[in-house]
Image (cartoon, helix red, strand yellow):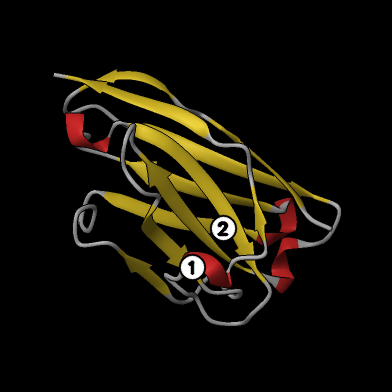
Amino acid sequence: QVQLVESGGGLVQAGGSLRLSCAASGRTLSNYAMGWFRQAPGKEREFVAAISRSGLSTYYADSVKGRFTISRTNAKNTVYLQMNSLKPEDTAVYYCAAALRNYYTTAIDEYDYWGQGTQVTVSS
């Protein structure tokens, strides 16, 4: 079992930045590809960013490309999502997830473990 806990969410003005963290316990995160997803009220959960086990490969949704950066520090069992130039449409609950595989994936059903989520609210 892997327990994931997100932190770093909050309220920020448009154009601002936040850094989300996802800390894991139970098993080492180095065995897992990791992803960030988000869910806005009344909408389905959507893919945001993913990173391979090694951290050498990343992938982003078009809506966040160039503004968000996913990274990981396996020694600290932690994954990050740096979010810059935030927009009101980025408002959502953000979830991190772990997939027992080498390469990243954008598919929700490929992920084995999920955190409880952290709220990000961007005001205009």
Say left or right for 60 vs 124: right
Q: Quadrant of the N terminus?
A: bottom right
Residue 24 locus on image (x, y percent):
73, 49
Q: CA distance from mark 1 to mark 2?
A: 8 Å
Q: Residue at x 50, y 60 (%)?
A: 35
Q: Which mark is residue 72?
A: 2
- Residue 86 against residue 51 in the figure, above or below: above
Residue 117 in sight: yes
Q: Residue at x 37, y 58 (%)?
A: 47
- Residue 77 against residue 100 in the figure, above or below: above
Secondary structure under the numbered disc 1 in the rendered image: strand
The residue under label 1 is: 51
Q: Nearer the viewer, mark 1 or mark 2?
A: 1
Of label 1 and label 2, which has the lower sequence position? 1
Determine contact: label 1, label 2, CB under 8 Å.
yes
Count every numbered label the image shows and give the total.
2
Three-letter residue code for mark 2? Arg
The local crowd at label 2, few if under 14, some if 14 to 19, many if 20 or more residues have their Cα within 10 Å, is many
Three-letter residue code for mark 1? Ile
